[in-house]
Image (cartoon, rainbow, N blue to C red):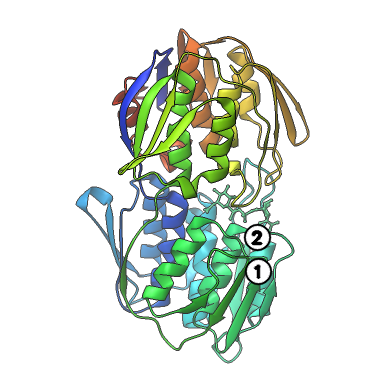
Amino acid sequence: MDSILVKGNGALSGVIPIAGAKNACLTLMPATLLSEEPLTLTNAPRLADVRMMTTLLQSLGAEVTSMSQGQVLAMSSHDISNLTADYDIVRKMRASILVLGPLLARFGQAVVSLPGGCAIGARPVDLHLQALEALGARLDLRDGYVHASVPGGRLKGAVIDFPLVSVGATENALMAAVLAKGTTEIRNAAREPEIVDLAHCLQKMGAQIEGEGTSTLTIQGVDRLCGATHPVVTDRIELGTYMLAPAICGGEVELLGGRLDLVAAFAEKLDAAGIQVSETVRGLKVSRGGNRVKAVDVVTAPFPGFPTDLQAQMMALMCTAEGVSVLEERIFENRFMHAPELMRMGARIEVHGGTATVTGVPRLKGAPVMATDLRASISLILAGLAAEGETVVSRVYHLDRGYERVEEKLSAVGAKIERIRGE
Ligand code: UD1
């Protein structure tokens, strides 16, 4: 298994190109199942999870061709031959559940394995299932699979009122509703940029959707959707992660393709911590002078709040801040697994339930650490850049699921980072 070696670093400078969003791409890809005409995605990120979704779609009979070194995905679901998403693929990636809505909407039936438990809390899919039932699906849970069918063959528009905001459940409901008969209103919908991106792609395919980016989505079902070509929105989590590199090491880095509206709540916190963020014609520029970063408090929330997917990385910054910072995790239980690893590097952190209190120390010390999930892995790399000596992050397969060419991107701005190939 590969590991990443990071050495304590001086100031960074240069540019980092930001890729298309993993989480947008993983929901745009299943949208191909809604139409028999081709759907082409551009600006796709080159990630293990995207390859996994490719395998899943191919197992259903879709054609997926990766072009331009993986940045273009040409898909066709003309000849879907299998309506079962197998456990072997689904267990490796939760986003697999996103094929359920589209399959049901177009074919009136589907069998999808339930995703397994996940390292960051229980993460059920009950809201996905309730939404599909509201649209008229019959669901039967047996042998670890959801066996779904639609009496009469076509879903019917309905009011879906989510008791809590869920990104994935909103996406599944939206993809199911675009082909349902009649009008669907999704209340308490997620407002994440990835949902807006999905809505825009579906609109290009002929879907009638209003209210994207607000908490109420109104969908007028259509009989069929056509093909489209769509660029995947910028990855706001990759963007925020690399904004933290100069924030932690000092220096100035320009993030190509970065947009302030995608990371507004996060940028506000950086500003409060004493980091300069400004817009450029090509993206965003982040710089930090000689002063020590100030401690700030963070509460994670659905968009437009502070993203849970940047909490671990922000904690890495707070480890060396001046003062005490309180980080509250409100989206997922058990999402502080990076804290004990950061403590191995000399960080002072106390975790009580969903709250972590970080008392900044002047300098972290390099240590061997273990990555436990995707965002935790990158937070340990960021911390390693700020630490004295060498840090070896092992178990980085998580990292490759969500960050393309991390060593390349960080070394281009002067970071001392390299991959040690495992057996
Ligand atoms: C998506 C992202 C993930 C991100 C998260 C929050 C993808 C593939 N994943 O995950 O990277 O961290 O949004 O921005 O896009 N919940 C239920 N029942 C459900 C669904 C969710 O109780 O059926 C709960 C979850 O346990 C969690 C909360 O709702 O507490 C939010 O989860 P959700 O927004 O659905 O996250 P995901 O779609 O899994």
Q: Residues within 10 Å of mark 2 (few under 14, many from 20)?
A: some
| Residue at 71% in and 60% down | 164
> Image height check: is 304 above or below 255?
below
| Residue at 52% in and 38% down | 267
The residue carrying mark 1 has its beta carbon less than 8 Å from ligand 1: yes
List x then y, in percent, for residue 9.
Answer: 41, 13
Q: Which residue is mark 2?
A: 125
| Residue at 70% in and 67% down | 162
- Amino acid, disc 1: Leu
The residue carrying mark 2 has its beta carbon less than 8 Å from ligand 1: yes
SS at mark 1? Answer: helix
Residue 148 versus residue 154: which sits nearer the camera?
A: 154
Q: Residue placed farthest to the top in the image?
A: 389
Instruction: Examine the rendering and report whether any part of residue 421 can be seen.
Output: yes
Question: Do labels 2 and 1 touch, CB within 8 Å?
Answer: yes
| Residue at 55% in and 78% down | 177
> Image height check: is 20 above or below 341?
below
Q: Residues within 10 Å of mark 1 (few under 14, many from 20)?
A: many
> Image height check: is 273 above or below 154?
above
Q: How many angstroms separate mark 2 from mark 1 (CA)? A: 7 Å
SS at mark 2? Answer: loop
Q: Residue placed farthest to the left in the image?
A: 68
List x then y, in percent, for residue 415.
Answer: 35, 20
Q: Quadrant of the N terminus?
A: top left
List x then y, in percent, for residue 96.
Answer: 50, 59
Residue 97 versus residue 312: which sits nearer the camera?
A: 312
- Amino acid, disc 2: Val
List x then y, in percent, for residue 25.
Answer: 41, 56
Q: Which residue is mark 1?
A: 129
